[in-house]
Image (cartoon, rainbow, N blue to C red):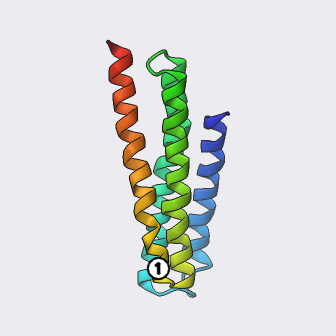
Amino acid sequence: MNWSAIGAVGLALAVALGAFGAHALRTELDAYSLDIWRGAVFYQFLHMLGLLIVPLFERAGALSRGVRTVVCSLMLLGVVLFSGSLYLLALTGIRRLGAITPLGGMSFVAAWLLLAFGLLRKSR
């Protein structure tokens, strides 16, 4: 799978969603919901950058292919669960969607910790 390409598309989508929130939703959502939207965009942006960059560690020989695949999968899953649930929460106001958000956050944390472990292991 071409994780960097997925990251690039995800970054383009984050820019589009950020612009959509700033312009089209500015008058439709209250300040709280707009803040939730901005948070979703921010975390999507950070982790799509991760998808763009993590494969470079593998190409440089600093990370194994298996670790790269799991790290990128966790980052993508995190974006879907974390940012996705926040986008839906901002648009619908259904607070129960917030129960999904921590699962995405755990995926992010697991991805970053696994990346650190993989980089340390490969450097030995």
* SS for callout 1: helix
User: Outermost residue toward the top?
Assistant: 124
- Number of marks present in the image shown: 1
Residue 6 in percent (x, y) is at: 65, 43
**Residue located at (50% from left, 45% from top):** 74
Quadrant holding the C terminus:
top left
Tell me which residue sits at (51%, 85%) in the image: 93
Q: Amino acid at mark 1?
A: Arg
**Residue 83, percent from left and from top:** 51, 62
Q: Residue drawn at (40%, 33%), measured in percent from left and top?
A: 115
Relative depth, front residue between 7 and 101: 101
Between 61 and 94, the one lying in front of the other is 94
Q: Between residue 23 and residue 39, name the one nearer to us.
A: 39
- Provide residue 109's location: percent of width, then percent of height: 37, 47
Near mark 1 (Cα within 10 A), the count class, few <14, some 14-19 or many ≥20, is few
Q: Which residue is mark 1?
A: 96
The residue depicted at 51 percent of the width and 34 percent of the height is 53
